[in-house]
Structure formats: C-alpha cells, structure tokens
Amino acid sequence: MTITLSTETRKLLEEKLKSGGYTSADDVVHAALQALNELESGSLDDETLDALDRAEDDIDHGAVHEWRDVREQVRSKFLEP
C-alpha cells in the first residue's frame, strides 16, 4: 500500500518521531488510529466510568461543593506561600 501525506502531515509525523516516544512512523500512525477509534466509539474506560459513578453518588448524597470554594482551597493550599 502506498500512502501519500501532505507536507503538514509529514511535518507532524516527523515531530512525533523526534519527540522520542515512537520508534517508527508505523507506531505513530497506529497510536493515532487507536485514539481515533476510541474517540469515534464514544466509549469510556472502566476507571473513568467508575469515577463518574462515584461522582453521581456524591451528588445524590449532597456531597457537592461550589467551584469557587474548591478553587480557593486549592489556591491557598498549593499556590500561596
């Protein structure tokens, strides 16, 4: 099979190869196609589904917090000296 890539796609492929995370163009294309399949299938992994279930349980039990409050707690704990 012969595959023709645009200049832009070729540059993106070369950048991924240079990043060191992939050993061949085939590895990059394979990873990209797997990611595309996951996006198109719309399915979530078990860990994400479990986290969503726990979040829904928390909401049902009233264990929710205002975003502003959570944001301020995070800022004071991690961003302020």
Image: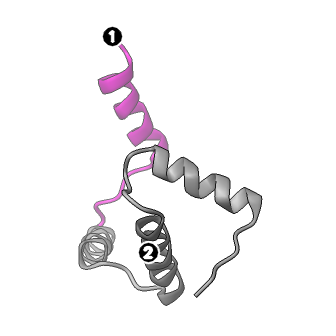
Looking at the rendered image, the quarter that the C terminus falls into is top left
Q: Which mark is residue 64?
A: none
Furthest toward the front, the residue is: 2
Colour scheme: one colour
Question: Which of the two discs, 1 and 2, sits closer to the camera?
Answer: 2
Q: Residue at x 36, y 33 (%)?
A: 74
Q: Amino acid at mark 2?
A: His
Q: Give the magenta-colored segment's residue range.
A: 62-81
Give the percent coordinates (x, y) of residue 40: 54, 85
Position of 55 relative to 74 (above/below): below
Q: Is residue 5 left or right of residue 22?
A: right
Question: Quick check: is 19 in the magenta stretch?
Answer: no
Q: Residue at x 30, y 78 (%)?
A: 45
Give the percent coordinates (x, y) of residue 9: 68, 62
- The alpha-carbon separation of the residues under discs 1 and 2 comes to 45 Å
Q: Residue at x 43, y 78 (%)?
A: 34
- Label 1 sits on a secondary structure element that is loop
Give the percent coordinates (x, y) of residue 56: 32, 74
**Quadrant location of residue 77?**
top left
Q: Residue at x 42, y 31 (%)?
A: 72
Residue closest to the eye, 63 or 44: 44
Q: Main secondary structure of the magenta part?
A: helix
Residue closest to the eye, 57 or 41: 41
Circle 2 packing at 10 Å, graded few (<14), some (14-19), many (20+), is: few
Q: Amino acid at mark 1?
A: Pro
Position of 75 relative to 69 (above/below): above
Q: Is residue 42 left or right of residue 11?
A: left
- Label 2 sits on a secondary structure element that is helix
In the picture of the structure, the residue carrying the numbered disc 2 is 30
In the picture of the structure, the residue carrying the numbered disc 1 is 81
Furthest toward the top, the residue is: 81
